Amino acid sequence: MSGDAGLSENWATLWEAFVDAHPEQTAVVIGDESLSWRELDDQASRLAGALGERGIGQGTRMAQLMFNCPEYLGSAYAAFKLRASPVNVNYRYKAPEIAYICDNAGAEVLVFHGSLGERVADARASMPTVRVLLQVDDGAPLIDGAEWYHEAIAAAEPAERIERSGDDTLMLYTGGTTGNPKGVVWRHVDLFGGLAYTAYMSAGIEVPTTVEAVGRIAAELQVDGKSPVMLCAPPLMHGTALFLAIGAFVMGGTVVLLGGRSFDADELWNLVEREKVTQISLVGDAFARPLNEALDVAESTGRARDLTSVTRIVSTGATLSADQKRGFQARLPNAAIFDMIGASEGGPFAVSMTMPGDEPPETAIFTAPPHVVTIDGETGEVLPRGSDTPGMLAASGAMPRGYWNDDAKTADTFRVIDGVRYTVPGDYATIADDGTVTLLGRGSVCINSGGEKIYPEEVEVAARLHPNVVDATVVGVPHERFGETVVLVCSVSAATDADDIIASVKQQIADYKAPRRVVIVDEVYRAPNGKADYRWAREQAQAAG
């Protein structure tokens, strides 16, 4: 549809249509702060004006190093308005990592929270393309060479609206499990295809063909009380939150985000009650477990929460176990639970849906949508459904253009087979005749022990079935005889013997896949988006000997 003269599929142009259609509608709630579409557009327009005066425009890149805040969405919107690309930077990164992202992306602007200013100052010499530093005030002093974000906006005139293209891009850096982060380049038109189409079709609405229709539909859904109030548990600096916000906006929805700088389950439930949230988006058990535990505590103290507004829970990026689904079902009787496997590079690759009143399926039991296949890792051919050969999950349809400045990795991940382009992030699985998916894990962290291939996710799922295992990550460490041996790094809820955990795993999967060693830690470290950090787990396994 990128050639349609009526619909540019540029997110700034579409968001401007929402402003025109319902300017006083709440666009975003972040903790105790909220912004209407008019306020968000004014902030973004003035920032776009300020950046334009500084020579920022089409094709340039703006890095964002911030916690959740109104300025995060405002600066992303400003970049879209200028036909520039926002670039996410993980706020946990230290100076060398910040410098790597900004230098690799060729970012010319860095918007950052003042509390992260020391790291920015230390990184400055290693990111020569950055020439504009905008500091968001959170109580820290202004660093040398930076300007205050709020002063830049206050002094600028709003940028005029311009013609834009669906070919404009945004860049999403994904840490992955090995190597340096990679910039995934999404065109606006492809992201519209991946997010908006799904939103419209799931609601039984014909996909609009003009910008005006996008705004009108959003306003009508809002007036009719059918637009979502979507709470995203992961922070904005991960693509999940920004993408889900975009999907909610086209439906006239309001996006709700946590205001704290670390995940707080009670804050989330407070926001659900206060804002009458209809959809919660999270990432697997790393979020689900503390959420259910917080409800346990509330119930034990006689605190009855009103969660009847929630009609959908969506988990993506990590598996959601059956026991956590049951916990949600007991407290949120109106909620359908969607467990999806996706990636920054596209998807979804597999879906598990539990409707209200259904018995949850076993952990990690998914179904592959029609556009998903598996690809033989050796021959590169599409495997037939029902094959026992583990293959890489691959999805056709809307997807990024590729990785920034990495033609080799782009060719490896985005493959054309028999005239069809697939995104192939590297997750291994089998797909049965009936579409049932058995996840095996990421090929890049596949363990080779005595010639046997062992996929961490399969072992992790089995380990978490032990009643005392709270969280688990599985890695391979060097072994003189077998090349690698399997080590489970886990946290537990009560004193537990390692042999008991190993025996429990062996009841679920083949003995050779079971861990040879168990390292028990206070807490399994995960990224803020809930994804496993295999480098950290390997360090723990090796340090424990």
Image (cartoon, rainbow, N blue to C red):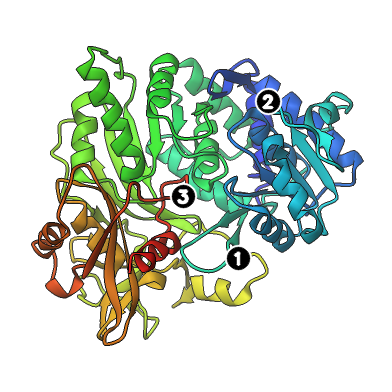
Nearest the eye: 208 or 203: 203
Residue drawn 22% across the image and 42% down it: 493
Nearest the eye: 459 or 502: 502
- Residue 218 visible at all: yes
Q: Is mark 3 on a helix, strand or loop?
A: loop
Q: Name the residue under label 1.
A: 403
Label 3, label 1: how far apart the Cα atoms are: 21 Å
Residue 326 shown left or right of residue 533 in the figure: left
Instruction: Look at the numbered discs 2 and 1 and tell me whether their residues touch, using CB distance below 8 Å.
Output: no
Of callouts 2 and 1, the N-terminal one: 2
Q: Position of residue 385 (x, y in %)?
A: 24, 70
Residue 372 shown left or right of residue 363 in the figure: right
Residue 111 shown left or right of residue 447 in the figure: right
Label 3, label 2: how far apart the Cα atoms are: 29 Å
* Front position among marks 3 and 1: 3
Nearest the eye: 350 or 127: 127
Label 2, label 1: how far apart the Cα atoms are: 30 Å
Q: Position of residue 151 (x, y in %)?
A: 84, 27
Q: Mark 3 points at which residue?
A: 527
Which label sits on residue 40? 2
| Displayed quadrant of residue 299 | top left
Q: What element carries label 2?
A: helix
Instruction: Look at the numbered discs 3 and 2 and tell me whether their residues touch, using CB distance below 8 Å.
Output: no
Residue drawn 46% across the image and 63% down it: 177
What amino acid type is highlighted by mark number 3?
Ala
State which quarter of the image contains the C terminus.
bottom left
| Displayed quadrant of residue 118 | top right
Work out whether 118 lies above or below 130.
above
* Front position among marks 3 and 2: 3
